[in-house]
Image: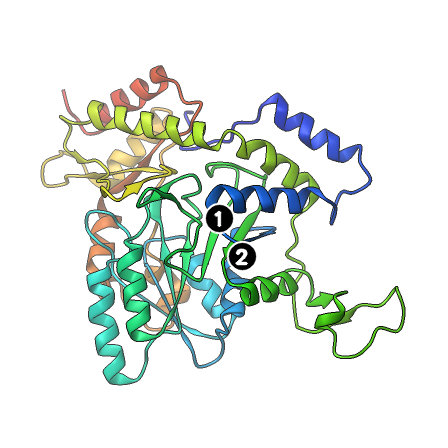
Amino acid sequence: MIPYGRQDIQQQDIEAVLEVLRSDFLTQGPVVPRFEQAVAEKTGATHALAVNSATSALHIACLALGLGEGDRLWTSPVTFVASANCGLYCGAKVDFVDIDPRTYNLCPEALESKLEQAKQEGRLPKVVVAVHLCGQPCDMQAIHALAQRYGFRVIEDASHAIGGKYQDEYIGNCRYSDITIFSFHPVKIITTAEGGMALTNDDQLAQRMNLLRSHGVTRDPELMTHEADGPWYYQQVDLGFNYRMTELQAALGVSQLERLDDYVAQRNALAERYDNLLAELPVTTPWQHPDSYSGRHLYVIRLKLDIVGVSHRQAFESLREQGIGVNLHYIPVHTQPYYQAMGFQPDDFPEAQRYYAEAISLPLYPTMSTAQQDEVVSALQQALEVA
């Protein structure tokens, strides 16, 4: 089976983790801050806070922005459920904005229209989570302009996008957002096994997220409510969580980060090769905005179902049967049973539904060979009954 994605672990990664195992610290040592500093320097962000998953990062980001009961969070329906669930964790109401039919990201025009209606009805969002699907950044300048006009805060869910660029600058610099989130899951662009990171240029947001990721406990005298009883003293000043990243994970991240640009370049080269190989097939290949340099976490095609002689499911199953580990990113969140119980209907966001009816994620990862890629294309031709 050729997987849709996989990690690349090299000897230098193994040595980095072994070095930590031989050290005095397995958690809360010097390597996590080293990883944070390296990512901050790479992206141009002022602060970077490592946590145990991107979901945890989304959660503390929402809390740091003050999201709570009675508030609203909006995001894209075409994303993993965590991009929406983070709002529910805080007691907020969640809603969605339909996608752009070319980028598959949250559509700024649909957002503007929905904001104007929400303003009239007194139900504007407090937070909008802009998801950089497949690694291609959203139109962040347009979303930021709307945030200034309508008064909401912006989180970039860049779980797919580390190493990519927007307007020739690395994603993660938070130029057009309050907080940016990265994921380091094994199939992502670089990995820490499990892990995530929140980046921001706001000192107060960084301080709050730092507290929230570690039980709300501090040893900083400036954050305490009264003078310390002694050198052993700490205080819980907020209700936090155990969302910390381990030294082992951070060591892997530091090592992987050294190859980030190479990984993204190879992903882009493979994606461009797919574009050429698939040009004559009845599929729509990913469109890339000229302002973006995608991290290319995923390569999603859309079947031209009015041309092909098989159904979406038949094509998917045929690829799997031929040993091609295709996937579908993602089932629109608003169609999940948990969200349908809130009143969402499948046809609420028609562009998302059209995407779901046609999308297939083809295998793409840096160590993929051209022979494997040729095998994927051959299998796709067979699956689509193309001679």
Disc 2 residue type (three-letter) = Ala
Residue under label 1:
182
Disc 1 crowd, CA 10 A, few/some/many (<14, 14-19, 20+) = many
Q: Is residue 329 visible?
A: no
Q: Residue at x 50, y 29 (%)?
A: 259
Q: Position of residue 326 (x, y in %)?
A: 35, 34
**Tally of numbered discs:** 2
Disc on res. 57: 2
Disc 2 crowd, CA 10 A, few/some/many (<14, 14-19, 20+) = many
In which image quadrant can residue 236 be found?
bottom right
Secondary element at tag 1:
strand
Q: Residue at x 47, y 53 (%)?
A: 181
Secondary element at tag 2:
helix
Q: Position of residue 30 (x, y in %)?
A: 72, 44
- Seen in the picture, residue 69 relative to 112 is either above or below; the reply is below
Considering the image in quadrants, where does the N terminus appear?
A: top left
Q: Is residue 375 visible?
A: yes
Q: How is the image coloured?
A: rainbow
Which one is in front, 223 or 133?
223
* Residue at the extreme top of the image, as rendered: 371
Considering the image in quadrants, where does the C terminus appear?
A: top left
- Seen in the picture, residue 141 relative to 87 is either above or below; the reply is above
In which image quadrant can residue 323 be found?
top left
Q: Residue at x 77, y 71 (%)?
A: 235
Disc 1 residue type (three-letter) = Phe
Determine the CA span between mark 2 and mark 1.
8 Å
Disc on res. 151: none
Check contact, mark 2 vs mark 1: CB within 8 A: yes
